[in-house]
Amino acid sequence: MQIDLVYHPDRTLKGKIRRRLVRLAHRRAAVVNLPRPLISFSFDDAPASAATIGAQLLEAHGHRGTYYISAALAGHDGPMGRYANAEQIAALAQAGHEIACHTYSHLDCGQANGAQADEDAALNDEVLRAWGAPSATSFAYPYGDVSAAAKQALAHRFTTLRALHHGLIETGSDLNQAPAIGIEGPDGEGAALRWMMRAAAKKAWLILYTHDVAESPSEWGCTPVALERLIAAADRLGFDVATVADAAARIGAPETARQSARAAA
Ligand SMILES: [Zn+2]
């Protein structure tokens, strides 16, 4: 299955206004009061190299990562190398990594209505559970974009919904459209480190993401050495390193309506 990883945003005035307004809609504000800064390492899509090399680098430091999987991509070849297959995803879950949701088909939630986004995410969760992962509580928007209706629908299903705009998670940050920093491109490592310094100073929660972890990475990935240096820096700077789900629990992220209903049932 081929997907278009280069995002072509709707550049019309309508598209620009939608992206501005959706940031203000259906918000769930975080309350962050931590003794130490908090960091999560995450991998989107996710290529097999992230599931093998990326996981080994985190495990060597006693840490675990979050993998935002689009199940329809699993095992297929793509521009960032082959995607992790069902067995590799099951092995990640076994090793204590978090299996989180992208949409099943890498559907662009910016162009989808609520029902379409929710159906695609539900299918993804169902397939991942069939492969041995627990039901996902974390979600990342493919391409970082979302419509107001899709945001509202998905917010009922997941504790955190991660986007791609830069920032830290602090008190008042929107957990339904959370910021993140990409370890990707020529300045990926530098940008990640600068945001780590800011997070450390403010005792905030920072989510980093990348895609492939390879000696010659795609433009969306990073090298093993860069990832290793960032993990070591997190330890040196006194960060607690946690999966996105564990970090959300640590800040006391409010449960979604659906999770509360499930717990009561
Ligand atoms: Zn993606």
Image (cartoon, rainbow, N blue to C red):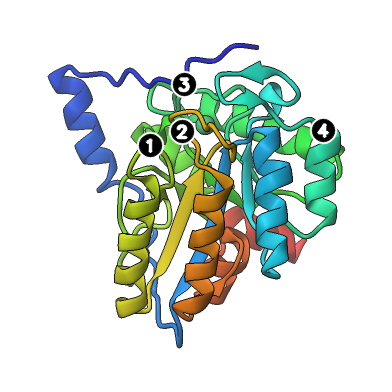
What whole-number distance in Å separates the C-alpha atoms at marks 1 and 3? 14 Å
Instruction: Point out the tag, 1 or 3, that comes first from the N-terminus.
Output: 3
**Image point 70% across, 52% down: which residue?**
55
What whole-number distance in Å separates the C-alpha atoms at marks 4 and 2? 22 Å
Q: How many marks?
A: 4
Coordinates of residue 2 in the picture (x, y in percent) = 59, 11
Q: Which mark is residue 86?
A: 4
Badge 2: few (under 14), some or many (20 or more) residues near its Cα, within 10 Å?
A: many
Instruction: Point out the tag, 1 or 4, that comes first from the N-terminus.
Output: 4
With 161 as the anchor, is 128 left or right in this view? right
Instruction: Point out the tag, 4 or 2, that comes first from the N-terminus.
Output: 4
Label 1: which secondary element: loop
Instruction: Point out the tag, 1 or 2, that comes first from the N-terminus.
Output: 1
Instruction: Point out the tag, 4 or 3, that comes first from the N-terminus.
Output: 3
Label 3: which secondary element: loop
What whole-number distance in Å separates the C-alpha atoms at marks 1 and 4? 28 Å
What whole-number distance in Å separates the C-alpha atoms at marks 4 and 3? 21 Å
Q: Amino acid at mark 4?
A: Ala
| Label 1 sits on residue | 185
Q: Does the beta carbon at disc 3 come under 8 Å from ligand 1?
A: yes
| Label 3 sits on residue | 5
**Labels 1 and 4 touching (C-beta < 8 A):** no
**Labels 1 and 2 touching (C-beta < 8 A):** yes
In the depicted structure, whether residue 140 falls above or below residue 75: below
